């Protein structure tokens, strides 16, 4: 489940960069330094990738099955066969309200 953002290393300000200089700082200073260096970065996620697919008819679902009838020893038996071909992903969806990114380095609530 991904959110909006780049998957390239070093673009997200709250992920670890692995630099030698960063290892000497503690976690709070390290994340604040990265936030200051990326002033346009936001901890919010506005989009997500959908897990649903369109089939040939334009129907939308997570999985598609077709019923097949097998005849064995004179007996008919119906089984479901999963369809995995000719499916198109739904794509990127906008969230109704933004969520906070998983890598956000601040404790929001302490119990």
Image (tube, grey):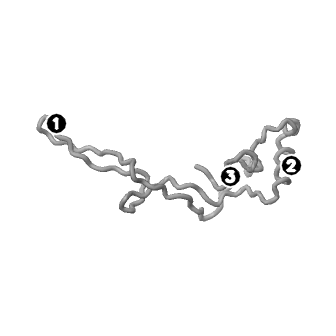
Q: Nearer the viewer, residue 47 or 89?
A: 89
Picture residue at 76% right of the left edge, 46% below the top:
10
Residue 33 has which mark? 2
Query: Which circle, 3 or 2, is nearer the viewer?
Result: 3
**CA neighbours of label 2 inside 10 A, class few (<14), some (14 to 19), many (20+):** some
Q: Secondary structure at mark 2?
A: helix
Q: Is residue 61 left or right of residue 74?
A: right
Q: Is residue 31 left or right of residue 76?
A: right
N-terminal of the two: label 1 or label 2? 2
C-alpha distance separating marks 3 and 2: 20 Å
- 21 is higher (above) or lower (below) than 1: above
Image-quadrant location for residue 25: top right
- 110 is higher (above) or lower (below) than 91: above
Residue 61 has which mark? none
Q: Nearer the viewer, residue 9 or 42?
A: 9
**CA neighbours of label 1 inside 10 A, class few (<14), some (14 to 19), many (20+):** few
Q: Nearer the viewer, residue 28 or 77?
A: 77
Residue 6 has which mark? 3
Task: Pinpoint residue 94: horizontal percent, then vertical percent.
Answer: 59, 63
N-terminal of the two: label 3 or label 2? 3
Task: Pinpoint residue 66: horizontal percent, then vertical percent.
Answer: 30, 50
C-alpha distance separating marks 1 and 2: 69 Å
Image-quadrant location for residue 15: top right
């Amino acid at each position: 489940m991904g959110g909006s953002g780049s998957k390239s290393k070093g673009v997200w300000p709250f992920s670890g960069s692995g630099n030698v200089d960063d290892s000497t700082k503690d976690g709070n200073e390290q994340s604040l330094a990265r936030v200051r260096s990326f002033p346009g970065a936001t901890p919010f996620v506005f989009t997500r990738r959908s897990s649903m697919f369109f089939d040939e008819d334009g129907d939308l679902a997570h999985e598609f099955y077709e019923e097949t009838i097998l005849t064995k020893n004179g007996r008919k038996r119906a089984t479901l066969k999963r369809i995995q071909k000719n499916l198109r992903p739904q794509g990127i969806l906008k969230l109704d309200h933004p969520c906070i990114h998983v890598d956000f380095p601040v404790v929001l609530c302490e119990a």
